[in-house]
Amino acid sequence: MDIAPPPSVVDLVEDKLADSIWKSWFNLLRESLQVEAWHSVGATGEPAFQNSWVNSITAGVPPASFYKDPLDVVHLRGNINTGLTATTAFTLPLGYRPPYTVVQIVYNNNGGPGPGGANVYLTVNTDGTVVPTFSAGTDIWLDGTSFRI
């Protein structure tokens, strides 16, 4: 949807319809920037977990989820566990897959990158497979993983 730029301040001062013009433009902008709800992995109609991966059952931690914002950036959140390293945890549907392989450093229950932490990577492949790779620990945090499609 193409949205015309807002009127200039001069136009608004001279135009007695300034209030309705701004309201109209703001409503068009708001409608075009609607953010979709989180899609929870494993929920009905959503991607299923694979290879023994499941949501971590920790109070206050959201389930593994994803959504696409109005700028076509996909965001992941949640904490998963019980799967084996370098196996697919779940597969993102069409429309949520990156145009190239994305590899991001993430954290797990054994820490993260740096002194004393485990190397933990989350790979999102162009076929939508989400693959955690780690050397120790099992709880993988998806939070902070994002990419533009």
Image (cartoon, rainbow, N blue to C red):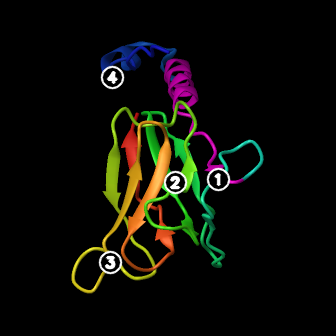
- What distance separates the C-alpha of mark 3 from that of mark 2? 19 Å
- The correct choice, above or below, for 115 with respect to 77 in the image is below
Residue at x-position 62% and y-position 49%: 38
Residue 9's label in the rendered image is: 4
- The quadrant of the image that shows the C terminus is top left
Label 4, label 1: how many angstroms apart (C-alpha)? 47 Å
Which numbered disc flags the more N-terminal residue, 2 or 1? 1
- For disc 3, the marked residue is 118
Q: Residue at 73% of width from left, 52% of height from top?
A: 43
Q: Which residue is mark 1?
A: 41
Residue farthest right in this picture: 44
In x, y percent, where is residue 8?
A: 33, 19
Rendering quarter of residue 9? top left
Q: Position of residue 16 (x, y in %)?
A: 49, 14
Tags 4 and 1 in contact by the CB under 8 Å rule?
no
Q: Disc 2 vs disc 4: Cβ atoms closer than 8 Å?
A: no
Which is more foreground, mark 3 or mark 4? 3
The answer to whether mark 3 and mark 2 are in CB contact below 8 A is no
Mark 1, other Cα within 10 Å: few <14 / some 14–19 / many ≥20: many
Q: Earlier in the sequence, mark 4 or mark 1?
A: 4
The stretch of residues the image draws in magenta is 20-42
Residue corresponding to mark 2: 88
Name the residue type under label 4: Val
x then y, percent, for residue 11: 36, 14
- Taking the image as shown, residue 113 lies to the left or right of residue 40, namely left
The three-letter amino acid code for the residue at tag 3 is Ala
Q: Amino acid at mark 2?
A: Thr
User: Front-most of 120 and 40?
Assistant: 120
Mark 2 → mark 1, Cα distance in angstroms? 13 Å
Labels 3 and 2: the sequence-earlier one:
2
- Element class at badge 3: loop
